[in-house]
């Protein structure tokens, strides 16, 4: 079902708004209060400045990805959806490699990898739906 570049189908828009909300909230927490996330993995924020920096860096990027989901349409939206697949896929690979290499404890690497994998799956679903609707 072709929805047109300016008026996406209501269910597609609702899904995008839901995904945007998740990204903006999670990204906002990572950006503004990275210690909250670090503590959830049993670590101490004051002892890990690299984690604080990394979470803030990924937080701002995640907020921008979320805003793109509601602010863009047409070709710009499809491009942003495709970029989100690459970004989240890279996050998944990074989290998994950090766990496999032993650089991050399994109790941290496993949930991070699963979260990133879920984000990759959601991003892929949205991208392929947009491509399908384009035809």
Image (cartoon, helix red, strand yellow):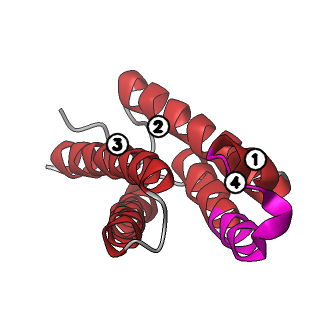
Q: CA distance from mark 1 to mark 2?
A: 20 Å
Seen at 70% across and 53% down, the residue is: 38
* Camera-side mark, 1 or 4: 4
The correct choice, above or below, for 98 with respect to 113 in the image is below
Residue under pointer 3: 122
Q: CA distance from mark 1 to mark 4?
A: 16 Å
Could you say where residue 55 lies in the image, as x and y percent from the top left?
Answer: 68, 64
Could you say where residue 130 lies in the image, as x and y percent from the top left?
Answer: 28, 47
Residue under pointer 4: 43
* Camera-side mark, 4 or 3: 4
Residue under pointer 2: 16
Q: CA distance from mark 3 to mark 2?
A: 10 Å
Residue under pointer 1: 29
Left or right relative to 32: residue 5: left
The reply to whether the C-beta atoms of the residues labelled 1 and 2 are less than 8 Å apart is no
Write down the region rendered in magenta. 41-58
Left or right relative to 9: residue 57: right
Could you say where residue 66 lies in the image, as x and y percent from the top left?
Answer: 59, 50
Judging from the image, what secondary structure is the residue with disc 2 in? helix
């Amino acid at each position: 079902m072709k929805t047109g570049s300016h008026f996406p189908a209501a269910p597609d828009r609702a899904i995008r708004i839901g995904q945007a909300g998740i990204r903006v909230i999670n990204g906002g927490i990572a950006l503004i209060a990275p210690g909250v996330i670090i503590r959830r993995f049993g670590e101490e924020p004051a002892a890990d400045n690299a984690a604080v920096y990394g979470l803030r860096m990924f937080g701002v990027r995640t907020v921008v990805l979320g805003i793109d989901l509601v602010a863009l349409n047409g070709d710009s939206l499809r491009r942003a959806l495709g970029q989100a697949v690459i970004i989240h896929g890279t996050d998944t690979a990074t989290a998994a490699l950090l766990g496999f290499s032993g650089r991050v404890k399994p109790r941290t690497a496993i949930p991070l990898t699963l979260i990133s994998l879920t984000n990759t799956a959601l991003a892929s679903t949205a991208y392929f739906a947009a491509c399908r609707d384009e035809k």
